[in-house]
Image: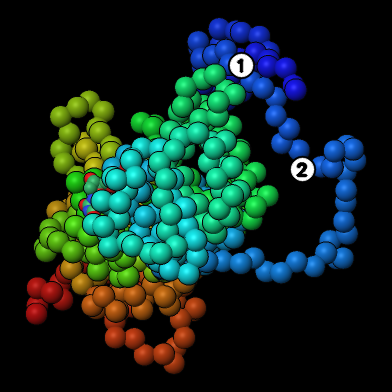
Amino acid sequence: MAKTKSVYICSECGQQYPKWAGRCNSCGAWNTLEETLIQPKSHSVVNTAGRLSVSSIASLDFEDETRYQTGMSELDRVLGGGLVKGSLVLLGGDPGIGKSTLLLQICGSLGKDKSVLYISGEESERQIKLRAQRLSVDSKGLYISSCTDCDVIIQGINEHKPDVVIIDSIQTMQLSEIQSAPGSLVQVRECTQSFMQAAKSMDISIFLVGHVNKDGGIAGPKVLEHIVDTVLYFEGDKQLSYRILRAAKNRFGSTNEIGVFEMQDKGLAEVQNPSAMLLTGRPAGVSGISVLCTIEGTRPVLAEVQALVSKTAFTSPRRMSEGFDYNRLCVLLAVLEKRTGYSFGGFDVYINVIGGLKIDEPASDLAIALALFSGLCDKPIGDDVAVFGEVGLGGEIRAVSYIRERVREAERMGFTKCIVPKASLKNLDKSEKYGISIYGASNLRQAFKVLEMLGKDKEEE
Ligand code: TYD
Ligand code: MG
């Protein structure tokens, strides 16, 4: 048997050292190296003789990956079209956001024709049963257990051979040969590695629940993300009922898709129409508000952007941004000042994207710029206007992709006007009829003019 050896592991970044040091050379953190006893395990995938086996890619013939439908189409889409057989998926999120609820709900539908094993290290079997009753989950194929010993669980999986396993949560799991406490970086990483091996060797899909720490990472920042196949984050404001599921990494699909859910008294319900959700409660006739049309994965989504521009009481004005990149906001303010002559120097600027949505698409620039302009001049943008376009450093509005999908979504949601990059107009099919007026603008000044013109039309009405 291999001898136990002592190593020093940085609790911040997971780097290993043979000797103790005051500072981690890899991440620069002080006093983070902890002594840990490890029994070296072989995680080898090459054959034991130590010879590498290679294959010509042309000679290999595998079937397409098998995917299970989880019964939640929002989750399936984020996974890239269903849960891949034999994959390890990490579901991260704040405590109480609804991770256990989501997974127990999919157990209900998966358990109808597959065998599913739900293992909780946090709740007793009684508690799981009560929750399942509340969620009306009573499938024959669903087995539950309360256990925290990683080796026992893997042995159990080997015996029962379920199709899908849920581990809730990875922070409660432990391997007895590792001395450190459950939830520590080493335990979390080694347990994840064991589950990864189990998933691959038995061809079983495993979901791991991971609680996010206060910095937003899953305990052992980033360390787990390298090991697993797919990383999903479940996000949302706990005060509000809406939850957004997004993929941060996906070996089997795109990471651009989002899934939208609403927490109700009988569990999570899918929100098929996120635009409607993100636009509810929009105040009418208030300045500093614009509606943007962004593409989340393959789906166009309308969202409300709010800008508050108010006289500053500080020597250097404040800039704050929620749901939109702070640096990008600073760039847009500089472009507005330099290219259009409107000065924000004496004003605090606050940006908020409604509904907990995080927008990082360049096409959202124009909506932010127009909300800022409207906030500064205290002139509302019409409630029936949607906008999108990328703003360049010269103040020009640049073409964006998916113009037709964006315009159609705005039309579907009852908007009657939209301001778009002039350069994108050529990508619209002239023969198609739209029930929405489309205004092209090639720079910020032109976009302001369109707003003014629409404002005047409104007054005349
Ligand atoms: P939970 O799934 O336990 O969160 P996590 O596993 O991410 O820690 O969700 C807990 C919250 O969800 C709790 O505040 C109660 C709420 N909830 C509902 O509103 N409706 C329900 O049907 C359920 C089961 C939970
Ligand atoms: Mg939970």
Foreground residue among 191 and 8: 191
For residue 58, what is the image quadrant?
bottom right
Q: Relative to residue 142, is residue 87 drawn left or right?
A: right
Label 1: state its secondary structure.
strand
Q: Position of residue 33 (x, y in %)?
A: 55, 14
Q: Residue at x 75, y 66 (%)?
A: 62
- Residue type indicated by callout 2: Val
Between disc 2 and disc 1, whose residue precedes?
1
Is disc 1's CB within 8 Å of ligand 2?
no
- Residue type indicated by callout 1: Leu
Q: Which residue is mark 1?
A: 37
Q: Relative to residue 345, is residue 29 drawn left or right?
A: right
For residue 355, what is the image quadrant?
bottom left
Q: Position of residue 181 (x, y in %)?
A: 47, 22
Q: Is residue 107 visible?
A: yes
Vertical placement of residue 270 versus 236, above or below:
below
Q: The C terminus appears in which quarter of the rendering?
A: bottom left
Mark 2 and mark 1 in contact? Answer it, CB < 8 Å: no
Which numbered tag is attached to residue 45? 2
Instruction: List the single residue furthest toward the front.
Output: 159
Q: Position of residue 339 (x, y in %)?
A: 37, 51
Foreground residue among 120 and 245: 120
Q: Is residue 82 visible?
A: no
Foreground residue among 125 and 214: 125
